[in-house]
Each structure stands twice: as C-alpha cells, then as structure tokens.
Image: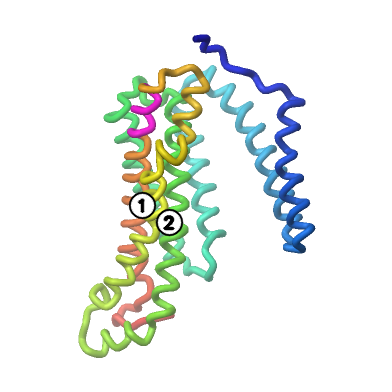
Amino acid sequence: MENDIINIQLLQLVFAYIFVLILLFIVKQKEIGHKGEILLASVRMTIQLVAVGFILEYVFANQNPYYSILILLIMEIFAIYNIYGRVDSEISKKMKGIIAGSMFLGTSISIFFFVLIVVGLDPWFRADYFIPLSGMLIGNSMTGISLGVNHLIDGFKDNKALIENYLMLGAEPETAVKEISNRAFYNAVLPTINSMMGMGIVFLPGMMTGQILAGASPVIAIKYQIAIMMGILGSVTLTVFFMVNRGARTFFNSRKQLKI
C-alpha cells in the first residue's frame, strides 16, 4: 500500500466551490437571504487558510518556541473575540474579562498537559504538533464557552423572578443560581459528548481522517483521535467550568442583589 499523499490540483480545488454555488442557488430559490454572508464566509475562509498555510510552512521549517507561543496567543485572542461576537446579548466588561481569563487558563492547562504528558512532545514547541493540537483544543473550547455564556444569560433572564424569590428567602447567590449554572455548564459540554457518542460509527473525525489520508496506520490514527478527544473534553470542561462559576457572580452586586 503506497503512502503517497494525493495532491489536489488547483483546478480540482476550484471544483469544490461548486458546493457553495449549490447552497447559493437553494438559498436564492427559497428566498432565505443571507447570500452575502455565505459568500463572505467562503472568501474569508479561503483567504485565512491560504495565509495560514504560508505562515505554517515557514514556522514548520524554522522550529522556534517563540513562534509557537506567538501563534498560540494569536489563536487565543481571535477565539476570545469570536466568543464576544457569538454572544446574543450585551455582556459587561467584567464578564468579558472572565471569558478571556477562562479561555487562557483552561486551554493553557489542557494544552501543556496534553503535549507534555499525553503526547510526550519533545521538544514541546515542535510546531507541526503543538500548533494543530492547540488549535483543536482552543476551537472546541471557544464553542463551549460561547454556548455556556448564552445559556447562562438566558437562564438569568428567564428565571429573574425565581432568583429574586430565593434571595428574599435568605438564600446565598450561589444557591439561588445553582440550577441555572449547572444547566449552562451541561448544555455547553453536551455537543462534545454527543460528538463522542457517534464517533467511529456514524462518522470518522477530522484528525483521524487526516492521518489516514497522510498514510498513517489506522491503529495509530485511532490512538491519536482518542487522545485528542479526551484533551478536547478536558479543555472544554475546564474553560466552561471557570467561566460559569465566576461568570454567574457578575449578575450580582456587592450587596448580593440581582442586577440584570
């Protein structure tokens, strides 16, 4: 069995954009709108990936811990600003700070534990491993926190009267919002759990597929996929846990009164 990677030619890549045209045609026929958003997403994705491809070519050829850390910080910053954009409601500066802190702390712990202990990467900054693995953990944590923030805000808005009743009866803020916080946490990690449920039977995940296409043994690809899914689960869990626990406190003032 040959392990040569099939190179997709430029013309073949252009053919892939037919799927975008199909989507635009259906959207137009159904009068759904958002054609500009679809085009923007396609163009933006293409430009970003091409730019990242050239950057990674250079970084992989010039292994340097400063490059790896710099790219990690850039990914973190973009992920945090994406979270701000995904939140349906206006959020306070304090909540924004908690979101940023939760992302940095949760993903950093998960990334360095994963690359040092689970993978045993040596040197730890080896960019062809460090950057893709970090990107997967950060990307999934970004989605988790986005869901967590939205569910947390909706929970407070929908249960404002109930929370105030708890407070009037003498309950501490943590007790009054425990169920809301727990529900927000669970709803944020649920997509990760659901993807694990169908993985291997319903679909082959991206990392495993990529390694198999690159010529790696399916057994090795499976081991990496199991490991990265555990890493993703851990990263999402930590980041959402930090955000929900600290974020819930921002809805109360110094006198333990609800402020929405």
Quick one: SS at disc 1? helix
Q: Label 1 is placed on what type of residue?
A: Thr
Total marks in image = 2
Main structural element of the magenta stretch: helix, strand or loop?
helix
- Dot label at residue 81: none
Whether 128 is drawn above or below 254: the answer is above
Q: CA distance from mark 2 to mark 1?
A: 7 Å
Q: Is residue 178 left or right of residue 68?
A: left
Rendered location of residue 72, percent (x, y): 47, 37
At a point 33% along the width and 41% down the height, the residue shown is 110
Q: Which residues are magenta?
A: 220-227
Which residue is label 2 attached to? Answer: 145
Look at the numbered discs 2 and 1 and tell me whether their residues touch, using CB distance below 8 Å.
yes
Residue ID at (77%, 63%): 31
Q: Is residue 13 left or right of residue 124?
A: right
Q: Quadrant location of the C terminus?
A: bottom left
Residue shown at 74% from the left, 54% from the top: 26
Residue pictured at 45% horizontal, 60% vertical: 147
Mark nearer the N terminus (2 vs 1): 2
